[in-house]
Image (cartoon, coloured by chain):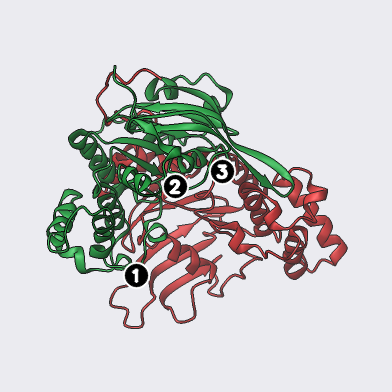
Amino acid sequence: MTGPLVSIRNLSVSYRRDASSPSLGNIDLDIAAGERLAIIGESGSGKSTLALAIAGLLPPTTAVNGAILWSGQPQLPRGGRDIGFVFQDASASLDPVMAVGRQIAEVAHTHLGLGWPQAQSRALDLLRRVRLPEPETALHAYPHQLSGGQRQRVAIAAAIAAGPRLLIADEATSALDTIVQADIVALIRQLVAEDGMALLFVSHDIALAAELADRIAVFRSGEMVELGTADAVIQTPQHAYTKKLLDAHIGLDAAPMIAATGHGHV
Amino acid sequence: MSDPLLAVSGLTKRFRRSGTTVIAADNISLSISGGETLALAGPSGSGKSTIARLILRLIEPDAGRVDFDGGDFLALHGAALRAKRARLQMVFQDPLAALNPRATVARVLDDPLRIHGLASRGERPDRIATLLERVGLSPDLAGRHLHEISGGQRQRVAIARAIATKPSLIVLDEAVSALDVSVRGQILELLLDLQRTERIAYLFVSHDLGVVRAFAHRVILLEGGRIAEQGDARAVIDNPQSTIGKALVAAVPRLTRTQDRS
């Protein structure tokens, strides 16, 4: 019997010194090893703040109270080694003037102590795993030479290069078109299953979260209003806000907003 | 049957990019009637935004014809073009990028009224208040800066600016894509209300097939600058025939709810 991978206890985060309007308040949440947990919410809900807090990426001026335990230990995990982070905008997280192979190899070199030839060879393996076309050529490509979806594949390869136990994806597919988004979600699902990683999937899209996650946590205005299995949250939401989010979703089965008209011609 | 409000034929635009030519719009023909919503959907790079920008004359086509409001829109210049532009408005995804973020709400709405000579200086504050009320905002917001108000309020201001010149067609380029879902529904309802009362037609550029299906009368699915499929929005999306149509529909995340929403 092992405890949770991450235990969050009474976590509060405030970007302002006075802490009168916390961005995140009194959060208690466990992330089990190997589970896929989705954090959903709208702008200002605190979902990204939670992801940054877990990864230790909040600005130094932020007031953080409470505890984040990593495998039951109070010492913070190391970003890159223990936690891989994929952001929404891959062009902003990749170095524009460094070949992508080198960027991935750097992670393996830094955190796994591999020599450069081994690190480069691991980068090539990773580019194959994220299914980048022509991986040998892509190793020497620069980010601007790749499409948005390909850049996000590279960012994922770099995020998992050191074999982290937790992968955090913060709106990682939100800037991609629907078809590429579905491919990247399938890739993330496969990678976390193969490597036994836990996944923290931060998204505004409740349908996407429902398709991918084992559990869903719903955030609003810095508070976690509901937490449950994906099925329970979708089928029997307990909180009024969760119901509101579900009702606001416009899926392929939504009732038309317009009346049928004689505009059938083309 | 009267002539369509907008009739596009043979619209073509090629971009040269690092030595290769990309055909962003390849012999596109389409039409929109008054009070109708036509959606353009497709993957990134399919040409949906390019076609919208060609119609708005934000970029010039290599070939093709655009008839709008009873005349050759591409042939217009100077004062005639400015006058016709009042009838063809646009709302983009990010109002902070499309409008001056440091301007006040009043300033953003004053511009079209002044430029198109729609109201004297003395009349304009009242007209601005009326516009704000029409889009569901308090006139008290007039003195606020754009960066001080919420994303949903900003998009309402962008819509108020678009309707200030009493347009017959508004191009909505991913205009609700960046909004929170709880706000998105309200903005779509506002747009539908304007369509019903003012008979405004929309060219609705969107990547979201669920919203297209609920909001648009007809849809054109694009791939590689070409029309892959078109027709009644619900008929096309419920039963796509083209390869890209099937792929687009299959990629939409499903929220399967068995429970009745009561």
State which chain is coloured red.
A
Location of residue A171 in the rendering, given as x and y in whole percent from the top left corner: 49, 53
Residue lying at 20% horizontally and 49% vertically, measured from the top left? B135
Q: Quadrant of residue B173?
A: top left
Q: Is residue A12 above or below residue A41?
A: below
Residue B206 seen in the current view: no
Q: From the image, which quarter does the C terminus of chain A lie in?
A: top left
Mark 1, chain letter? B
Q: Amino acid at mark 3?
A: Val
| Rendered colour, chain B | green
Q: Amino acid at mark 2?
A: Arg
Mark 3, chain letter? A
Crowdedness of circle 2 by 10 Å Cα count: few (<14), some, many (20+)?
A: many
Residue that badge 3 annotates? A185
| SS for callout 2 | strand
Q: Earlier in the sequence, mark 3 or mark 2?
A: 3
Residue that badge 1 annotates? B102
Location of residue A56 in the rendering, given as x and y in whole percent from the top left corner: 53, 71
